[in-house]
Image (tube, rainbow, N blue to C red):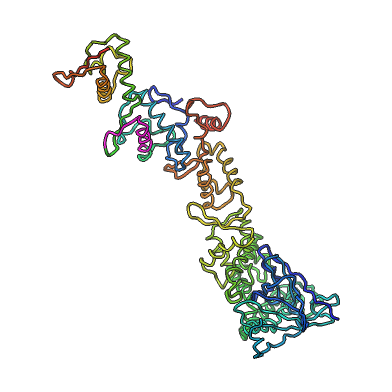
């Protein structure tokens, strides 16, 4: 009696997107999927949830349940065989949900994993509406056939052989390790890199399918080449990676700009395009939000996001829709529109009161009491973009914290003293309080 | 303390936002209130009856902080006084404004009180005497705007406390008070 095969859990981001490994790329999405064991009379469900979203990546099948924010996975390497689709003409099969049967390898403890000692047959049931089983099967087989998980494994091993001059053993020891001594050693290293690059290019352009899988590598190579072309008058060839990448800050920015290796595209996600895009966007904005102090204009997000995607750019309407969808999901970010019409993205945890407290204390410093606060002053002190600083100042004004002063020097804001003035006693200033502080600051300077 | 002639300016006269029309409603209301009071106090102190918006008034600018009220702001504050019944527009174009730092009714009462205190009932005075004569020196009546004075006297006439009669020329207009 065979036990029910179990699936390992898969990790998700806070926006219910799968966490991808390095080198893993999303290939296809299919909603409304169930997984059953192949008991002919009474099939048992293999997932603790129903009607999940199947994410096919270059390395795995990930079954996502958004309702419970959980997911399970099957490594593609554990799939021994995918049975061809049955083309049955019976009436029963016309109304039934399409099924794909897979033979998977099972380890001793019953988990579906590669190199198991046993095997079992499981069935993928496609219950989603508008699911074309032939399209799905075609895509699925393509991914299985390309066996990308093996490529990534060997690439990792190969690259370590290139970098370190002292690596002795390596699985792919096809390279002749020569001593890296002097200029000839450096030149030889350069030569090896360029030969490998050349071979990469040749392989890529021969087969279009192979090109697609090499796309990520291509982006990286193109970027490296571009940077090399830009550095004029560089003295030493074969400089170390650190010098190429520049300072740590540049490294960060570079990583950010090529940070998304598997953009959600209309092709991979089909009808789910906007939903998945919305979730991916929520994941993406986290880092820039932190850098910018909790709030970014929508325009800036549009530029950053498209730059990171590289290709498959999204339109402004797509971005707006993606942000609007956030209301339906439980994501930690939100879109917000100021009275002036400026749209921003901010963390849900962002507190207006905290910003107002900072503005209020800035406006009460002696300099600010004398000359007021301009949007650029506030931007500098708060560490945010000037456009956003102006929005915050305007909000503080409408709350009654600040007053505006319009003059030849432009628009400035002062702490609101009108509330402190007693109409019945306009000549007296109490010895404590805001009015007194202002009076002292302004009369001392003369 | 800053002064404009004899008049003592309040501390907030040096607060730049005081000279910018505030957009936020609550803040605006406070600002308008302060300006209304200031205009009335200043006008009373300096015996100003007419404010002309086309001329520079020392009240509406503060050179030490390099700020002045815009034309729009002046109209807003004076209109607020008009709504309160403490001022009147003298022309449709809102270029000149009559400031009633004492209401016409108050002027009438003041005149009557003055007449009684000085035993001038049953006496006759010319209008010009009331405005610049010896008897009214040192009182509020000295230098009163002619138009305002006539309106106050007419009010008294309606109440039967005075009779106005014309002289041979405009300067000879006279008033007879009755007790």
Q: Quadrant of the N terminus of chain A?
A: bottom right
The residues colored magenta run B74-91
Depth check, front residue: A395 or A197:
A395
> How far from the left and from the top, in percent, is residue A191?
68, 78
Tell me which secondary structure the magenta stretch mostly adopts: helix
Asked whether, in this view, residue A307 is left or right of residue A341, the answer is right
Residue drawn at (59%, 40%), measured in percent from left and top?
Answer: A361
Q: Is residue A86 above or below residue A410?
A: below
> How far from the left and from the top, in percent, is residue B52?
30, 33
Residue drawn at (62%, 81%), measured in percent from left and top?
Answer: A211
Asked whether, in this view, residue A212 is left or right of residue B142, the answer is right
> How far from the left and from the top, in percent, is residue A250?
63, 62
Residue drawn at (55%, 46%), measured in percent from left and top?
Answer: A378
Q: Is residue B29 above or below residue A329?
A: above
Q: Quadrant of residue A215?
A: bottom right
Count the numbered circles shown. Answer: 0
Residue A334 seen: yes
Asked whether, in this view, residue B175 is left or right of residue B139, the answer is left
Q: Residue furthest left?
A: B168
Q: Is residue A437 above or below residue A90?
A: above
Query: Does the magenta portion include B173?
Result: no
Q: Quadrant of residue A42?
A: bottom right
Residue drawn at (52%, 51%), measured in percent from left and top?
Answer: A386
Depth check, front residue: A420 or A132:
A132
């Amino acid at each position: 009696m065979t036990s029910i095969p179990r699936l390992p859990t898969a990790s998700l981001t806070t926006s219910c997107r799968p966490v991808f490994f390095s080198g893993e790329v999303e290939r296809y999405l299919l909603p409304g999927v169930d997984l059953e064991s192949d008991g002919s009379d009474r099939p048992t469900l293999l997932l603790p949830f129903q009607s999940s979203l199947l994410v096919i990546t270059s390395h795995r099948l990930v079954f996502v349940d958004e309702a419970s924010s959980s997911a399970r996975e099957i490594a593609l390497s554990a799939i021994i065989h995918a049975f061809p689709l049955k083309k049955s003409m019976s009436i029963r099969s016309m109304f039934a949900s399409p099924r794909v049967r897979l033979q998977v390898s099972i380890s001793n403890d019953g988990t579906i994993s590669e190199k198991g000692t046993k095997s079992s047959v499981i069935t993928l049931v496609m219950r989603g509406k508008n699911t074309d089983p032939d399209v799905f099967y075609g895509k699925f087989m393509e991914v299985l056939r390309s066996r990308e998980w093996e490529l990534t494994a060997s690439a990792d091993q190969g690259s370590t052989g290139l970098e370190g001059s002292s690596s002795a053993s390596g699985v792919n020891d096809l390279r002749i390790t020569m001593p890296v001594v002097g200029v000839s050693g450096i030149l030889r290293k350069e030569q090896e890199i360029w030969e490998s690059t050349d071979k990469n290019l040749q392989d890529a352009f021969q087969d279009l399918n192979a090109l697609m899988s090499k796309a990520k590598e291509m982006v990286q190579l193109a970027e490296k080449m571009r940077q090399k072309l830009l550095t004029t008058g560089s003295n030493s060839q074969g400089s170390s990676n650190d010098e190429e990448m520049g300072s740590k800050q540049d490294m960060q920015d570079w990583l950010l700009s090529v940070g998304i290796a598997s953009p959600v595209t209309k092709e991979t996600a089909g009808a789910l395009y906007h939903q998945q895009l919305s979730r991916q966007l929520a994941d993406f904005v986290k880092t820039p939000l932190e850098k910018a102090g909790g709030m970014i204009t929508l325009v800036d997000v549009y530029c950053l996001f498209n730059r990171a995607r590289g290709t498959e750019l999204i339109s402004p309407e797509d971005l707006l829709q993606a942000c609007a969808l956030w209301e339906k999901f439980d994501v930690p970010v939100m879109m917000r529109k100021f009275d002036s019409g400026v749209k921003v993205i901010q963390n849900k945890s962002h507190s207006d009161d905290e910003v107002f407290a900072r503005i209020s204390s800035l406006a009460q410093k002696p300099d600010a009491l004398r000359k007021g606060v301009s949007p650029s002053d506030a931007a500098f002190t708060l560490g945010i973009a000037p456009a956003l600083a102006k929005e915050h100042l305007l909000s503080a004004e409408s709350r009654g914290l600040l007053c505006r002063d319009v003059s030849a020097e432009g628009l400035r804001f002062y702490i609101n003293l009108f509330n402190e003035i007693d109409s019945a006693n306009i000549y007296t200033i109490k010895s404590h309080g805001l009015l007194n502080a202002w009076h002292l600051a302004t009369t001392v300077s003369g | 303390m800053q002064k404009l002639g004899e008049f003592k300016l309040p501390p907030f006269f040096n607060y730049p936002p005081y000279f910018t029309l505030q957009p936020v409603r609550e803040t605006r209301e406070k600002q308008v209130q302060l300006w209304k009071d200031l205009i009335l106090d200043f006008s009373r102190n300096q015996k100003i009856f007419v404010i002309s918006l086309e001329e520079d008034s020392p009240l509406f600018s503060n050179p030490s902080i390099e700020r002045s009220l815009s034309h729009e702001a002046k109209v807003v504050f004076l209109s607020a006084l008009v709504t309160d019944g403490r001022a009147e527009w003298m022309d449709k174009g809102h270029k000149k404004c009559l400031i009633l730092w004492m209401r016409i009714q108050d002027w009438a009462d003041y005149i009557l009180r003055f007449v009684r205190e000085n035993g001038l009932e049953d006496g006759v005075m010319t209008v010009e005497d009331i405005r610049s004569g010896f008897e009214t020196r040192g009182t509020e009546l000295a230098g009163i705007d002619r138009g305002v004075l006539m309106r106050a006297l007419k009010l008294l006439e309606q109440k039967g406390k005075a009779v106005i009669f014309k002289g041979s020329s405009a300067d000879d207009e006279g008033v007879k008070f009755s007790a």
